[in-house]
Amino acid sequence: METPALKAQRLLEQLHRQRQNEVDKVPPGYMTIKQYGKLWKMGRSNTERLLKKAVKNKMVKVVRLRQVVEGRITILSFYG
């Protein structure tokens, strides 16, 4: 017979596996700060500074999407 703790652990594992499949789809043309940095051959800080100015001046849009990063679900900003 299964103990309540074991049952709860199995439920948590099922929920985690289910959530891993619930990531958001990145719209075409949108990239992260890291991706822009590689493209522009700049560091993260300078890239972030430029993109924040571009968002403020309405040159680009920003969307926050759920993505899996190193096995964890996290919310990332995508610029496009």
Image (cartoon, grey):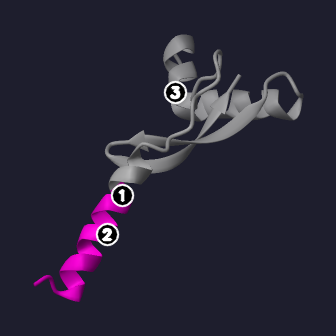
Which one is nearer the viewer's eye here, 52 or 45?
52
For marks 1 and 2 on the same chain, the one whose residue lies earlier in the sequence? 2
Disc 3 designates what residue? 43
For marks 3 and 2 on the same chain, the one whose residue lies earlier in the sequence? 2
What quarter of the picture does the C terminus occupy? Answer: top right
Residue at horizontal 60 percent and vertical 41 percent from the top: 65
For marks 3 and 1 on the same chain, the one whose residue lies earlier in the sequence? 1
Please identify the quarter of the rendering in which residue 64 is found: top right
Disc 2 designates what residue? 11
Residue at horizontal 49 percent and vertical 40 percent from the top: 67
Disc 1 designates what residue? 16
| Callout in the foreground (3, 1) | 1
Mark 3: few/some/many CA within 10 Å (<14, 14-19, 20+): few
Q: Amino acid at mark 1?
A: His
Which one is nearer the viewer's eye here, 75 or 17?
17
Please identify the quarter of the rendering in which residue 78 is found: top right
What quarter of the picture does the N terminus occupy? Answer: bottom left
Mark 1: few/some/many CA within 10 Å (<14, 14-19, 20+): few
Q: Amino acid at mark 3?
A: Gly
Please identify the quarter of the rendering in which residue 9 is found: bottom left
Check residue 30 for magenta coloring.
Answer: no
Which one is nearer the viewer's eye here, 66 or 10?
10
**Lateral position of residue 57 relative to residue 67, left or right:** right
Residue at horizontal 73 percent and vertical 34 percent from the top: 62
Instruction: Assign a secondary structure to mark 3.
Output: loop
